Image (cartoon, helix red, strand yellow):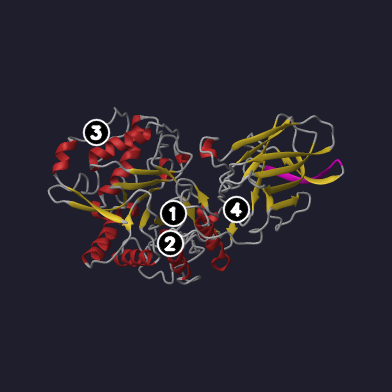
Amino acid sequence: MRTLIVLTGSLAALLGGAATSAQTTWFEEPQAPGRWTGPGGDEPERIETFSADEPVVGTYLFYWYDEYSGAHLTYGDGGDACTTHPPSWWDYSFKSTRWWLEQLQDITAAGIDFAAPVYWGYPGDYDGWSFAGLPHLVRACDYLQRLGRRYPKIALFYDTSTLQHNAPGRHIDLSTPDGKAWFYCSIRDFFSLIPARHRAAIAGRPIVLLYSPHFAARQDPALFPYVRERFRADFGVDPYIIKQTSWQGEADNTCDWGGALGLRLAGCAALGPGYDHTAVRGRQPLIVPREGGEFYRRSWERLLAMSRERRPWLVMVETWNEFHEGTDVAESREYGRRYIDLTREYADRFRTGERMQPSGPFAQARAVEADLGAERADAGVRIVASGDGAFIRTERAGRACVESTPTEHGGRYLYFDLDPSFAFEIDPQPMRITVEYLDAGCDALQLEYDSLDPGGSVREGAFKAGGRVEIARSGRWLSAHFEIDDARFADRANGADFRLAVLGQGELALAAIRVEKLAAD
């Protein structure tokens, strides 16, 4: 449900002057490029807002395309820069109010509540597409509002790539006064161009989604309190900050990028139709097939299989129209309006609170197991490679097996993923995990699993310890059993459901694994 909040000019008097930033050394704050700071002057601003915890769907809107200059459409040599394409490039431009109007109407048709333009602006550089496109967006919103038509509200997706890649060539250090001011002014500048009546807000607080912190030279947990203080002074409200989980400091919510590769669950859910960046030069190939829409359906249905109590109330569709990486759900030459229709179907089901029953080959199974020496895709449990989870297939002590290998990340793990039809975001259920391991090599192995216990480990229990086995170095194949009763198994363990930590010197060899559901006491 959306409600209306009315801000009047009298609020500005209550707030007093803008917060004063700490002394800076190189960054001189420019004046905001837009006029919509403050609570609206003498005229009231009617803010249509979402209530906290109601089902809401958003999407990331890329607006860097320009048919007239070829920006983000072709390379300098004329090569195609996009893997997927809109039905026509005619007037496909951030400079076109008509284009913005078409996008807003289609986003509404897809059942999406708000759009987050992907913003690359930074303070003082007010000539680029990030600024030039927003007045046309506002005109399109104004037009739909005058007609009394529903349209998506506007949030900010702050693409923090600019913390490292910007015209001045500065690598922004967020632990310094200058860095904090630069970061805040980037947010301020965007909202100064978007009137309050068009902003997407949670309980009256404008939504700010943050991309990765890794482009910053350094982080500082004090950044977010600083941003809130400055934003409150300039706009009369706190922002609703949604961070990627790797940001330091307290935010209002979390959302992990990567939903186009498969459902991601943090405080918000992220999902998308697949991924294919074939057209992007200089990258290693990565394709997650769309499977005619089935991949997208599975992600939505996994989300809808969750209990309403644990299901995230905010879903980000990744993405509306990122044609370079082929993650678009907008109308396209390749897929027509199929993904608009699919998004509408599942967004409506999400809003009604429907809970779907698990379906698939292991929905009725009491146990799944895999012979790790024989690679099979249909075993119900599989070993998966991860950044700190590398392995080889080999033979040890007369058995085919997998064995951990060192990685550049320091830690060594073997990661396992369960078929979602067997277990995904499960209700409390006693489980037993059995592994056949070679009693040789490392010093010990430890189970770490995605749990329901938010205090069980970092990332709200995604790596809770579930037992440890010491290696006696007998050189024999042995079995170890781990019994747990609070598994969540929502793919939060770096995209897997659980992992075995390899402790001490040497490697860990496994020949088989079994996961079974036990009867409750």
Q: Is residue 85 above or below residue 376?
A: below
Task: Name the quadrant of the C terminus.
Answer: top right
- Which secondary structure lies at badge 3? loop
Q: Are marks 2 and 3 in contact (CB under 8 Å)?
A: no
Give the residues drawn in magenta, as a range.
390-397
- Residue 147 in the figure: left or right of residue 272: left
Q: Which residue is mark 2?
A: 347
Q: Which residue is mark 3?
A: 19
Upstream in sequence: badge 1 or badge 4: 4
Task: Name the quadrant of the N terminus.
Answer: bottom left
Q: Which residue is mark 4?
A: 284
Decide: few, some or many residues near mark 4? Use Cα within 10 Å; few <14, some 14-19, many ≥20.
few
- Which secondary structure lies at badge 4? loop
Upstream in sequence: badge 4 or badge 3: 3
Residue 166 in sight:
no
Mark 3: which amino acid? Ala
Upstream in sequence: badge 1 or badge 2: 1
Decide: few, some or many residues near mark 3? Use Cα within 10 Å; few <14, some 14-19, many ≥20.
some
Spatial CA distance of label 2 from label 3 is: 40 Å
**Residue 57 within the segment the image draws in magenta:** no
Spatial CA distance of label 1 from label 4 is: 29 Å
**Residue 395 within the segment the image draws in magenta:** yes
- Which secondary structure lies at badge 1? strand
Nearest the eye: 362 or 400: 362
Mark 4 vs mark 2: give the one in front. 2
Q: Are marks 1 and 2 in contact (CB under 8 Å)?
A: yes
Residue 239, percent from left and from top? 31, 43
Residue 387, percent from left and from top? 62, 43
Residue furthest right in the image? 398
Mark 4: which amino acid? Gln
